[in-house]
Amino acid sequence: MTRGLLSSTAFQRNKNILQGTTTISLGDFNFFHGQDRKQVRKDIIRLKALLKINDNPVVLAQQVHGKEIGVVRKRPRTQISYIPRTDALVTDLPGILLGILTADCVPVFLYDREKRVIGAIHAGWRGVAKGIVPDTVRKMRSSFRCRPEDITAAIGPHICRSHYEVDMATAHELGLRARGKIKVDLGRLIRQQLLAAGVKGAYIAATGLCTYGSLRLYSFRRQREMAGRMLSFLLIK
């Protein structure tokens, strides 16, 4: 993998997939809320050059902390585009880079090894509470006849339990019964949801990297309004 990128062990040896998450060294990919969208476009173009996919289009989810899933069924006409009001994307088309932006929320990557279908998910606590991860597995099944047992999943860098304290109302929305404040392991909850959706435990991997604890990564809780965004991406070769 190119310097400045993090990849999951689930995909590192898979020649059919290009997967990764950028670090701060490669720039700020905050396409929707950043100060300079022109600079973000330049950073995306530079990243594509590093990955040697200069001519491949990038499709982003707009991300509104909802549960809508966009299905990419045709090649975009522009090099950088997005699907409004979505927090997950799926496609069976080779050569399209699906992109998710995070700075503490969880990027989740899905790949059906048999049907060659991919899914990229932005999962903050609201998305986890709304079930966007199992919903994306179901969308892959309904749209492309994927079987959960054929899916490889990777849970990307996100804020870890030791740095993620939430109030009682948030904990209850996540199905956790506790008084006062509680520290939440979003990665663990997502793994449980994947298992319940039929994905095999042997095919679920996690990077184990905490965005709050690593100065290589953006973290909204650590940096507040100064936080940029990492780009997590997935592409079928």
Image (cartoon, grey):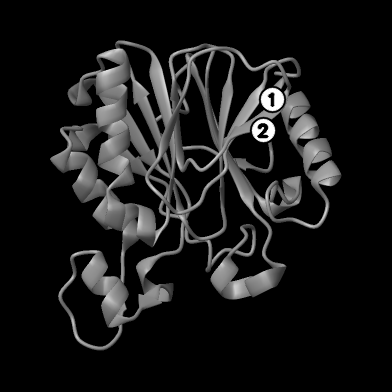
State how far apart marks 2 and 1 are (Cα): 7 Å
Pointers 2 and 1 in contact (C-beta within 8 Å): yes
Image quarter of residue 39: top right
- Numbered circle sitting on residue 121: none
144, above or below 209, in the image = above
Residue extending furthest toward the front: 84
Q: Amino acid at mark 2?
A: Thr
Q: Secondary structure at mark 1?
A: helix
Q: Is residue 79 left or right of residue 164?
A: right
Q: Residue at x 18, y 70 (%)?
A: 176
Q: Secondary structure at mark 2?
A: loop
- Residue 186: in sight, yes or no? yes
Q: Residue at x 18, y 80 (%)?
A: 178
Q: Is residue 49 left or right of residue 184?
A: right
Q: Amino acid at mark 1?
A: Leu
Q: Which residue is mark 1?
A: 51
149, above or below 217, in the image = above
Q: Is residue 23 left or right of residue 237?
A: right
Which quadrant is the N terminus positioned in?
A: top right
Image quarter of residue 88: top left
Q: Residue at x 63, y 73 (%)?
A: 224
Q: Which residue is mark 2?
A: 2
